[in-house]
Image (cartoon, rainbow, N blue to C red):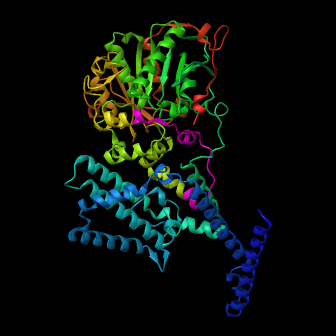
């Protein structure tokens, strides 16, 4: 800070101090006895002034930065305006402009106002707790209920949001895909317009602002500008976790490496291990350590403790060198990893797990191996929240039309798509939880970020090869070609899922918004071999990462061979807790033989050349 800046600051503070003293002297004779404290204290006014000055300086500094270096920030953080535009374009399909609808809304609205205001006498709450007709956790704080203005505000908002979303559900005259976009756009817009998201309509923010004399807004704008600079919404303390120290900690060695992936072999913790090893393919749109967050939540550590020889592929985040990478390359990579594990341990086959997009790819890999007469290389296949039939693939389909595909092409530079855009897309699917919750807490209230390993992983983005990404969206999500026999060819081999006779364990999350259970279920309709379907409680992440020790959630099984998901649910048996033990029992039944955990079963031992310690370099590349 220069001497001139310091001098200007002192003059600025002194000016407000003198103004405050003058106001106190002028108004004091007019105030009732004992009310002198109601006159703003000069120190308070100085504090407010400094908060305003800090805010102004931060915005000016940021403006100067952006005039030199402009990031497509709003696009990368999720462009709410795009969905507002979509909503406005299709709003004509809603009956909101019809006189009958407006009259009904007016009457219901007046009844709501009468009901709410009737519980307040003279502007204060008549009872202890108002009986408000609509509940929402965004307005759970009692300050939304204490004052009639804020009670009426949030109840009116919830009423209108409910009616708009119902109108979108009932909209007529739209193709199915456009109707789904209207429903999604309505949800995005109504979530964004919540009175909780604005400082002057949120009583919690108003109270905090008055108590801190604006310091919460200063801290919040610091958070906001930091996020704008990096082009990504922050969910957790960025300095709380370090790979290999307190996250991704399970001991192991990188035993193989290609330009596309590293292969990690984890150190056994039992004297004996199952002869058939386990090879896990995590999705390359995220980091692999979602399965190794910490010792308590780690699926990898748990699987090792069950006596499995565990291998995991750690994919490289895309850069310019991967501009020509396509789906064929990921399928070849899976086959290469399978062959490397088989050769390393001198075994005929491996168990495999494919998570999300890697599960979709694993299905293609199995079909290709079957076509080539090499299906015996895989003893079993487990699918975590993986889709092959994308007809009912959920809200992600709202991001896939010609306009948005063209936008993605324009945003891709040097042959890869910035991972921050994918993060923004997934955040938009759960806007209240993953966007607006943080806007309120960290931007408006100025709170510090929590140390949360799952959110750290969620923000640790990976870049995607543009050619693969565009083809994946077009061929699978848009055109649904994978389920058409021989419609797709990879590595010079036609893909027909009906050839897959490998025993399969298929897991879906009951509340999964990325791979809905009705979509995951459809894999069962394309297999020639035996399969076991488990419906787990929770969603895309918590439904998978649910260790037995946590005692959380539940899962459902139905051994009666149901033909549809509805039949499965109708006859399903619920079991409390984690589905992991059921999976382990199934795995052990596929190949029960065990061998001593020695030789190359212990990576990095005598005569075993390895590359580096887990979690490896690739997981750290940005």
Q: Which residue is situated farthest in the right direction here?
A: 3
Which quadrant holds residue 533? top left
The residue at 74%/84% (across/down) is 21
Farthest-out residue, bottom? 29
Left or right of 74? Residue 178 is left
Whole-percent x and y of residue 546? 50, 33
Question: Is the residue 94 above or below the residue 121 in the image?
Answer: above
At 44% from the left and 45% from the top, the residue drawn is: 411
Left or right: where 306 falls relative to 168: right
Q: Quadrant of the N terminus?
A: bottom right
Q: Give the answer, above or below, for where 398 lies relative to 382.
A: below
Residue closest to the eye, 146 or 440: 440
- Marks counted in the figure total 0
In the rendered image, residue 463, in percent from the top left (x then y), is placed at 50, 37
Q: Is residue 175 magenta?
A: no
Viewer-proximal residue, 589 or 40? 40
The percent position of residue 226, horizontal first and vertical second, equals 60, 53
Whether residue 399 is visible to the viewer of this picture, yes or no, is no
The image quadrant of residue 562 is: top left
The outermost residue toward the left is: 173
Q: Is residue 187 above or below residue 369?
A: below
Residue 137 shows in the view: yes
- Residue 592 left/right relative to 397: right
Q: Residue at x 54, y 10 (%)?
A: 344
Q: Is residue 460 magenta?
A: yes
Q: Quadrant of the C terminus?
A: top right
Q: Which residues are magenta?
A: 440-469
In the image, residue 378 lies at what x, y percent? 41, 14
């Amino acid at each position: 800070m220069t001497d001139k800046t310091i001098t200007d600051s002192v003059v600025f503070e002194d000016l407000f101090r003198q103004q405050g003293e003058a106001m106190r002297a002028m108004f004091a004779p007019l105030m009732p006895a004992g009310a002198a404290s109601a006159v703003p204290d000069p120190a308070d006014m100085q504090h407010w002034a400094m908060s305003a000055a800090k805010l102004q300086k931060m915005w000016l500094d940021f403006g100067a930065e952006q005039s030199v270096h402009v990031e497509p920030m709003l696009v990368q953080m999720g462009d709410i305006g795009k969905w507002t535009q979509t909503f406005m374009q299709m709003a004509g399909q809603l009956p909101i402009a019809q006189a009958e609808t407006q009259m009904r809304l007016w009457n219901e609205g007046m009844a709501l106002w009468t009901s709410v205001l009737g519980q307040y006498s003279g502007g204060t709450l008549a009872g202890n707790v108002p009986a408000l007709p609509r509940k929402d956790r965004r307005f759970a704080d009692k300050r939304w209920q204490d004052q009639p203005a804020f009670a009426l505000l949030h109840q009116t908002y919830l009423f209108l949001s409910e009616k708009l979303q119902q109108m979108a559900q009932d909209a007529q005259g739209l193709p199915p895909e456009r109707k789904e976009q209207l429903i999604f756009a309505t949800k995005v817009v109504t979530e964004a317009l919540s009175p909780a998201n604005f400082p002057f309509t949120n009583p919690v923010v108003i109270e905090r602002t008055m108590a801190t004399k604006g310091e919460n807004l200063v801290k919040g704008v610091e958070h906001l500008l930091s996020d704008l600079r990096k082009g990504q919404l922050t969910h957790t303390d960025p300095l709380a976790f370090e790979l290999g120290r307190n996250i991704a900690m399970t001991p192991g060695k990188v035993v193989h490496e290609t330009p596309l992936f590293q292969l990690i072999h984890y150190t056994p913790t039992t004297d004996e291990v199952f002869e058939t090893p386990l090879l896990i393919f995590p999705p390359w749109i995220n980091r692999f350590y979602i399965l190794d967050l910490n010792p308590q939540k780690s699926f990898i550590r748990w699987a090792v403790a069950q006596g499995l020889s565990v291998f995991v592929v750690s994919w490289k985040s895309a850069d310019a060198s991967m501009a020509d990478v396509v789906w064929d390359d990921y399928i070849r990579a899976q086959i290469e990893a399978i062959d490397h594990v088989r050769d390393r341990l001198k075994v005929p086959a491996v168990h495999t797990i494919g998570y999300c997009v890697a599960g979709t790819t694993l299905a293609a890999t199995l079909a290709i191996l079957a076509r080539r007469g090499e299906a015996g290389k895989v003893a079993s296949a487990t699918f975590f929240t993986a889709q092959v039939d994308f007809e009912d693939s959920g809200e992600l389909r709202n991001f896939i039309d010609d306009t948005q595909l063209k936008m993605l092409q324009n945003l891709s530079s040097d042959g890869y798509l910035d991972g921050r855009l994918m993060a923004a897309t997934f955040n938009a699917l759960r806007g209240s939880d993953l966007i607006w919750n943080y806007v309120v807490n960290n931007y408006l209230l100025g709170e510090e970020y929590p140390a949360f390993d799952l959110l750290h992983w969620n923000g640790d983005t990976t870049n995607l090869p543009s050619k693969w990404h565009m083809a994946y969206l077009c061929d699978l999500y848009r055109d649904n070609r994978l389920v058409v026999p021989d419609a797709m060819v990879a590595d010079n081999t036609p893909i027909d899922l009906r050839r897959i006779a490998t025993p399969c364990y298929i897991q879906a999350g009951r509340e999964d918004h990325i791979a809905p259970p009705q979509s995951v279920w459809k894999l069962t309709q394309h297999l020639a071999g035996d399969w076991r379907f488990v419906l787990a409680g929770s969603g895309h992440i918590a439904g998978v990462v649910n260790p037995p020790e946590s005692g959380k959630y539940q899962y459902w099984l139905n051994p009666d061979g149901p033909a549809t998901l509805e039949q499965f649910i109708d006859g399903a048996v619920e079991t409390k807790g984690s589905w992991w033990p059921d999976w382990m029992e199934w795995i052990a039944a596929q190949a029960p033989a065990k061998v001593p955990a020695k030789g190359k079963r212990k990576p990095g031992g005598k005569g075993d050349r390895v590359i580096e310690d887990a979690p490896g370099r690739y997981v750290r590349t940005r």
